[in-house]
């Protein structure tokens, strides 16, 4: 195929408005560069806009299924495909591409743009003294030298997409399992519909209604939980440092940075521990990681940022700790007590202000006994997804180079 540019195979390539959209609690998802992953939109911590703002911000082009969104900076080069049912509004420093279906398969173009060779081309022209970004002219003129014919693209897409469908199915299973754990936590420990609740007396303590045997105390005073210390034991291998920005919900979505002990960033100072739940300290974030038997293989492979804080417990209480740290009440406390001039987040002093209802110990154990298997299955599914992604990423360049005929 004769050499073409990205503009040649797209109906249009437009950058988005260079204004900050007014946000609100509900409405259309506003896609900013942190919401653009490698192939998928990351919507767990997405900001939202009103219908009126949506109409203004989509005047140039309305995002639709099979359009691509490219990040111009802050993970510059990341590309995500808009899936069926996703209605979104594009924020600053994003680029909207509509592939021409007669020229290119949209899914294939997404994975093609994410390939190392094309990423190197795309990012070679990054400019900017403080914030590195990709220029629109370089995006439009990006050479598509070895783009295969459409029939080959479709065949490769069908092979690679089978991996992605399996991965997406696992993601949905993880989401359902974790939501089951959260739902059960709300039913038992917020609405007091736990087993045997009919026989338990509800009392009022300082304006807080609770079952008679329960306590309402600072979270850091709950003796079952110990704050996980900072500090990384000396290691001689290479580990992956995962920044907080590379965590979406309860999953690590970024590739991380390879580091050794001596040259790791100062923030790479958390070595995750078994039976520990970590959460992001920043206000208005919902990032939580948990480590159990299902993902214990990660413990000697990754480092976390000090933007996270963790609490360790016995295995038999881990499910309750997860439910508590992901509960609406705890997150609201975290947001209310977060402080800071430049980055609003929780510090040690404000963490001590957070209070929590602590139920009878038998309920903590019973809840955890039910939830721990769900969380372990989630961890195993994530490990399976990682293996599937690695297999897909090894197969893709061979398919595209012709080393494996299609």
Image (cartoon, rainbow, N blue to C red):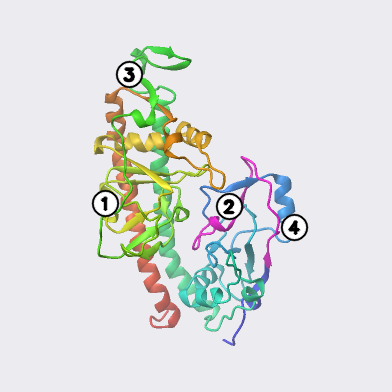
Q: Residues within 10 Å of mark 3 (few under 14, many from 20)?
A: few
Give the Cα distance between marks 3 and 4.
Answer: 57 Å
Mark 2 / mark 1, whichever is N-terminal: 2
- Residue 30 on the magenta span: yes
Which of disc 4 and disc 3 is earlier in sequence? Answer: 4
Residue 85: give its label: 2
Kindly identify which numbered label has been placed on residue 59.
4
Which comes sooner in the sequence, label 4 or label 2? 4
Query: Mark 2, mark 3: which one is toward the viewer?
Result: 3
Tell me if label 1 and label 4 are in contact, CB under 8 Å. no
Crowd band around label 1 with a 10 angstrom C-alpha radius: few (<14), some (14–19), many (20+): some
Q: Position of residue 113 (x, y in %)?
A: 53, 72
Which residue was labeled with disc 1?
296
> Is label 1 in a helix, a strand or a loop?
helix
The structure residue drawn at horizontal position 48% and vertical position 32%, both measured from the top left corner, is 333
Mark nearest the camera among 2 and 1 is: 1
Residue stretch rendered in magenta on the structure: 14-41
Percent x, y of residue 284:
53, 42
Q: CA distance from mark 2 to mark 3?
A: 42 Å
The earlier-in-sequence mark between 1 and 4 is: 4
Q: Is residue 113 magenta?
A: no
Q: Earlier in the sequence, mark 2 or mark 3?
A: 2
**Picture mark count:** 4
């Amino acid at each position: 195929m004769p050499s073409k540019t990205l503009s040649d195979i797209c109906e249009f390539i437009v950058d988005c408005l260079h204004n900050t959209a007014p946000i609100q609690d509900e409405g259309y998802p506003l896609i900013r560069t942190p919401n653009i992953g490698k192939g998928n939109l990351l919507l767990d911590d997405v900001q939202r806009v009103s219908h009126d703002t949506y109409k203004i911000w989509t005047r140039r082009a309305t995002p639709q299924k099979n359009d691509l969104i490219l990040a111009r900076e802050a993970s510059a080069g990341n590309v995500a495909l808009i899936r069926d049912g996703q209605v979104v509004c594009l924020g600053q420093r994003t680029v909207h591409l509509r592939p021409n279906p007669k020229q290119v398969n949209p899914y294939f173009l997404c994975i093609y743009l994410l390939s190392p060779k094309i990423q190197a081309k795309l990012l070679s022209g990054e400019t900017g003294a403080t914030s590195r970004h990709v220029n629109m002219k370089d995006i439009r003129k990006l050479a598509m030298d070895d783009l295969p014919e459409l029939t080959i693209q479709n065949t490769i897409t069908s092979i690679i997409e089978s991996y992605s469908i399996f991965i997406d199915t696992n993601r949905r299973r993880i989401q359902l399992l974790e939501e089951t754990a959260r739902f059960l936590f709300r039913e038992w420990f917020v609405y007091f519909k736990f087993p045997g609740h009919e026989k338990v007396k509800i009392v009022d303590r300082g304006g807080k209604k609770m079952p008679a045997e329960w306590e309402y105390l600072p979270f850091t005073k709950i003796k079952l939980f110990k704050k996980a210390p900072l500090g990384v034991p000396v290691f001689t291998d290479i580990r992956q440092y995962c920044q907080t920005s590379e965590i979406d919900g309860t999953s690590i979505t970024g590739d991380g940075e390879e580091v050794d002990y001596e040259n790791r960033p100062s923030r790479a100072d958390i070595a995750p521990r078994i039976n520990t739940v970590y959460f992001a300290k920043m206000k208005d974030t919902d990032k939580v990681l948990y480590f159990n038997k299902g993902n214990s293989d990660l413990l000697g492979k990754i480092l976390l940022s000090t933007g996270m804080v963790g609490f360790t417990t016995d295995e038999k209480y881990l499910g309750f700790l997860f439910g508590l740290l992901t509960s609406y009440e705890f997150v609201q406390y975290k947001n209310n007590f977060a402080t800071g001039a430049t980055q609003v987040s929780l510090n040690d002093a404000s963490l001590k202000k957070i209070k929590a209802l602590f139920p009878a110990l038998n309920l903590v154990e019973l809840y955890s006994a039910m939830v721990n298997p769900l969380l372990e299955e989630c961890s195993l599914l994530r490990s399976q997804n990682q293996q599937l992604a690695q297999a897909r990423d090894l197969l893709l360049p061979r398919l595209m180079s012709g080393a494996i005929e299609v």
